[in-house]
């Protein structure tokens, strides 16, 4: 997700030192007019690695395929995360998602190797949510979300949240296009952090933590949840897909 030229000085100020830095010369690293840089070259998993240290399994299956990072359980119940080699502090990350309806995934912000992170939810399944906030791996997990899926990706119901649902359930089928690429975006700043999320350009969450209980920096990770699901879904045959993954490092 990274490419640096004119923004290199600013970027380095917010980039972590605990992991290797991705450089402008790497494939897919063009900086767009908004200051975003690519951290996935569309062809390989260079700059990323699978962690076997989470509670979701030994990592799962992750490949670069058809211009996307594609993930699934590699055997029933076995998942995990794929995480950037580079670490970041304050940043905004954007990607396009076209997941099957069934797997539980997530966009991890400031993730550790064992998967502790502020998670922007990508729970694309019945009773799941997109772009709510969850404390992944925290001693006292917290969650805030303003909608939940029914048993169809085209139907949602509103839930109680500090941030009101910005798209009514009636308008959801026109707003969200299952089977097509939709954009998800998250921003994390400060520590205790404030986290903002967007779906297809519409803000879905504004959330602030009340205390500092996580490192200032960490990786960006994508998740395939471990374990089984009601109904006996075979999650080795259902996939998560992410492309056009890019980051903007913030002061």
Image: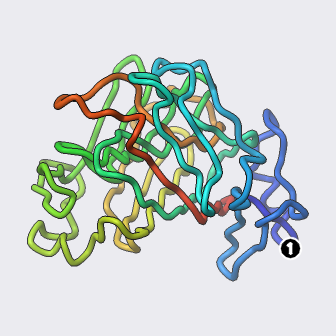
Task: Name the residue at 36% across, 35% down.
Answer: 235
Q: Is residue 4 left or right of residue 215?
A: right
Q: Is residue 22 left or right of residue 70?
A: right
Which color scheme did the rendering employ for the protein? rainbow
Is 114 rendered above or below residue 42? above
Task: Name the residue at 9% across, 72% down.
Answer: 170
Q: Quadrant of residue 225?
A: top left
Q: Is residue 203 left or right of residue 36?
A: left
Task: Name the residue at 57% across, 41% down.
Answer: 221
Q: Are there few (<14), some (14-19), or many (20+) residues within 10 Å of tag 1?
A: few
| Residue furthest to the bottom | 33
Quarter of the picture holding the C terminus: bottom right
| Residue furthest to the right | 25
Q: In terms of secondary structure, where does tag 1 sit?
A: loop
Q: Name the spot of residue 169 as percent of width and height, x first.
A: 11, 66
Query: Which residue is at the front of the view, 175 or 77?
Result: 77
Badge count: 1
Quarter of the picture holding the N terminus: bottom right
Q: Is residue 118 left or right of residue 207?
A: right
Q: Quadrant of residue 138?
A: top left
Query: Which residue is at the front of the view, 179 or 139?
Result: 179
Q: Quadrant of residue 68?
A: bottom right
Task: Name the residue at 15% across, 75% down.
Answer: 171
Q: Name the spot of residue 181 as percent of width and height, x first.
A: 43, 69
Q: Name the spot of residue 26 as percent of width and height, x first.
A: 86, 60
Q: Which residue is mark 1?
A: 6
Is 210 rendered above or below residue 98? above
Q: Name the spot of residue 140 as percent of width and height, x first.
A: 34, 20
């Amino acid at each position: 997700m990274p490419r640096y030229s004119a923004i290199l000085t600013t970027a380095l100020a917010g980039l972590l030192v605990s992991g290797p830095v991705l450089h402008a010369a790497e494939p897919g690293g063009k900086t767009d007019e908004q200051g975003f840089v690519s951290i996935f070259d569309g062809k390989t998993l260079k700059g990323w690695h699978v962690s076997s240290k989470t509670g979701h399994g030994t990592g799962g299956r992750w490949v670069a395929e058809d211009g996307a990072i594609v993930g699934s359980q590699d055997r029933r119940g076995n998942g995990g995360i794929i995480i950037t080699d580079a670490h970041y502090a304050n940043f905004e990350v954007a990607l396009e998602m076209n997941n099957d309806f069934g797997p539980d995934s997530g966009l991890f912000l400031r993730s550790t190797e064992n998967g502790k992170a502020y998670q922007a939810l990508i729970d694309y399944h019945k009773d799941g949510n997109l772009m709510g906030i969850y404390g992944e791996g925290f001693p006292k997990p917290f969650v805030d979300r303003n909608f939940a899926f029914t048993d169809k990706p085209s139907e949602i119901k509103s839930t109680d949240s500090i941030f009101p649902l910005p798209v009514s359930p009636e308008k959801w089928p026109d707003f969200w296009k299952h089977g097509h690429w939709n954009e998800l975006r998250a921003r994390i700043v400060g520590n205790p952090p404030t986290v903002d999320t967007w779906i297809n350009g519409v803000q879905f969450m504004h959330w602030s933590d009340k205390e500092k209980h996580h490192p200032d920096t960490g990786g960006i990770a994508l998740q395939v949840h471990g374990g089984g699901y009601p109904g006996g879904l075979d999650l080795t045959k259902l996939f998560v897909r992410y492309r056009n993954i890019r980051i903007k490092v913030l002061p």
